[in-house]
Image: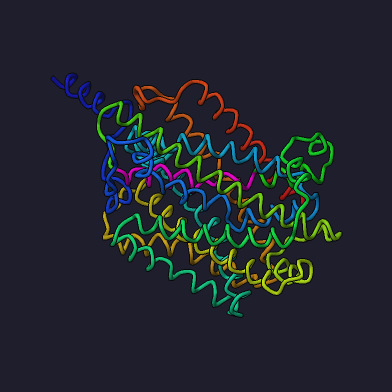
Amino acid sequence: MTSDVSQTAKAETGGWRHERRTPSLAEVFGTIKTRRSGSFWRRLAAFLGPGYLVAVGYMDPGNWATSLAGGSKFGYALLTIALLSNIMAIILQALCARLGVASTRDLAQACRDAFPRYVSWPLWALAELAICATDLAEVIGTAIGLNLLFGIPLELGVIITALDVFIILWLQNIGFRWIEALVIALLGVIALCFGLQILLADPDWAEVIKGFAPTTEIVTNPDMLYLALGILGATVMPHNLYLHSAIVQTRQVGESIPEKREAITLATIDSTIALMFALLINASILILAAATFNKTGQTNVQELGEVHSLIAPLLGSAWAPTLFGIALLCCGLNSTVTATLAGQVVMEGFLDIKLPPWARRLITRAIAIIPAAVVTIWYGEKGTAQLLILSQVVLSLQLPFAIVPLVLFTADKRKMGELVAPKWVVALAVLIAITVIALNIKLLYDFIAG
């Protein structure tokens, strides 16, 4: 009898150590209706949204710093690295969507349900550290944007960024679609600002196209290789893997295998489109730096505030610095919104806590924002570039502990059933994981070696 019960429990958990419990972001779980009939485009429209929240993490202020440095120093040559890193991100985020739909678990829940506590609790601590590092870069970006546009001191700007938690609470109460709408609207503003700046910069479009083609100089030139590693290493963010696997579950998905398979396809299309948009923004930053700074011989531009002061005389327009500041502020606001949601996913997923939504949101936000605010205020304006580098190094330490479980879970037929990732996707994901981990170890070694 006992044997029969244990076998039944094992069958129900489907290869997991524990049964699925309350989902993360429970207040918005399955709240968005989807279409199971009608045209393909109508069915796809219901799934569009989560990918754009994920795309925000691929264009945060840390990415801005590496793209600006790469464009100012080497012109358009590193556009090929931006493209390669985006392809890697597309595959990893597709696995996140697959995990969320197929197992109805986010990555944090999957780690909790697959590993014993002595493994899952350290993974939770590392994930929280990654959220703090992510918030550090985003808080800096928002504070600098407020300073550039309105003259607000950096220290006060850092505190103001904490108010985003109330915006999220309000929007989530009226529907998760409103959070997605806010993020997409801010992304549209960013794209418009960079579009106008690029028109003013008038880049060499033939060189831009050539920049997307691989060149051996990236490998043979040590300085170029270092910046290429920086762009690749700063691309895949650990918190995005946790976030995407959770917010894809805001959609109502049927229980049958065909329905789930279609949901995975539509969610993957959503994230792929959004990440191509992120590539457009990152490429725009690099193109702008190449067409303004590299063209005029200013090859060592890294500070975001420095860009703001230099860009007006180079582009010949008083509006150029304002456009840059608006884009930076929108980027910072977007990033803090998604990082806050990711923090909630990480805490709820790993710990399975039972608190009111407002209390969970305030706690997870405080865990991330307080260390970031203290460090930013301590360093002041002159240390922002070093803080952005520090945040990327911390993220590099945590990255393997998010990528490896994701690949293991989605490749395991006991856990994923008929929706297990195809072998060729798994092979690519393993190659990407090894590459990203190796590059991040290289960045970490270079950081320690000075």
| Image vertical order of residue 161 relative to residue 431, above or below | below
Please, which colouring scheme is shown?
A: rainbow
The foreground one among 114 and 215 is 215
Query: Residue 357, how many percent across, how many down?
Result: 29, 60
Q: Is residue 392 magenta?
A: no
Q: How many numbered discs sit on the rendered protein?
A: 0
Horizontal side of residue 219 vs 88, given as left or right: right
Residue 202's quadrant in the figure? bottom right
- The kind of secondary structure the magenta stretch mainly shows is helix
Q: Residue furthest front?
A: 39
Horizontal side of residue 106 vs 21, given as left or right: right
Query: Residue 55, how many percent across, how many down?
Result: 51, 49
The foreground one among 183 and 111 is 183
| Image vertical order of residue 65 relative to residue 223, above or below | below
| Image vertical order of residue 427 relative to residue 224, above or below | above
Residue 411's quadrant in the figure? top left
Q: Quadrant of the N terminus?
A: top left
Q: Residue at x 43, y 58 (%)?
A: 340
Q: Residue furthest right?
A: 297
The foreground one among 8 and 228 is 228
Q: Residue at x 38, y 67 (%)?
A: 167
Query: Residue 441, how many percent across, how many down?
Result: 66, 40
The foreground one among 340 and 35 is 35
Horizontal side of residue 216 vs 355, given as left or right: right
Query: Residue 366, how many percent across, how many down?
Result: 43, 65
Q: Residue at x 30, y 26 (%)?
A: 258
Q: Which residues are magenta?
A: 233-251
Q: Is residue 235 magenta?
A: yes
